[in-house]
Amino acid sequence: MESRENHKHGISIALAIFDETLCRFEEWARGREARSVLYGERNALSPGQRDSLFAEIASLRRLLQEIKEDLDLEGRVQDAASDVWSRSAALRETIMELDSSHLRRYGPVPPEVARIMDAAVPRLLDGLDRLVAAVSGARSEG
């Protein structure tokens, strides 16, 4: 029985990630185009491509539903506060490696770059901490 539960757990996780990806693709089909300071999206999908995506997503969701029912799998719900917390935690190392001591791995760091990044990194990390603090009440309540 333990082996069966381990398999179900592994299958559930993998298919939940698959389903999460379908949600992302559905956002593209609905016209998603996020724009920010250093990140932007371009969505040039034609109406026909969008319709095809919707149809394929629906088909795949029917298959996922069949598998879920056949194997008695449990779904996964992504909590927004937990997502903010975990993604912020994952970003910390990436941001910490932007200071001049870490940037040296790419070669000598120009003084102006070192000055800007050494000042910015602590502020970015503080910002991540504030993002986590903004949802910490929601995380502990949920």
Image (tube, rainbow, N blue to C red):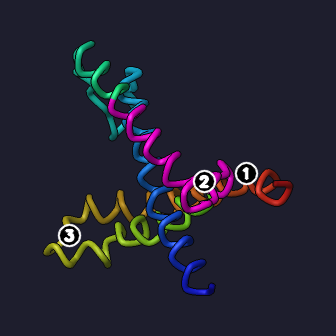
Query: Furthest residue to the left?
Result: 107
Q: Closest to the observer: 107 or 26?
A: 26
Question: Is label 2 in a helix, a strand or a loop?
Answer: helix
In the image: residue 22, left or right of residue 52: right
At label 3, which amino acid type do we have? Val
* Residue pictured at 55% horizontal, 71% vertical: 8
Question: Is label 1 in a helix, a strand or a loop?
Answer: helix
In the rendered structure, does residue 109 fall within the stretch colored magenta? no
In the image: residue 45, left or right of residue 62: left
Residue corresponding to mark 3: 109
Query: Furthest residue to the front?
Result: 70
Residue corresponding to mark 1: 135
How far from the left and from the top, in percent, is residue 136? 76, 57
Residue corresponding to mark 2: 84
Q: CA distance from mark 2 to mark 3?
A: 32 Å
Up/down of 32 relative to 22, above or below: above
Dot 2 or dot 1: first in sequence order is: 2
| Mark 2 and mark 1 residues within 8 Å of each other at the beta carbon | yes
Up/down of 108 relative to 45, above or below: below
* Residue pictured at 72% horizontal, 49% vertical: 134
Q: Quadrant of the C terminus?
A: bottom right
At label 2, which amino acid type do we have? Val
Magenta residues (range) = 56-84
Task: Please tell me the numbered disc located at residue 102.
Answer: none
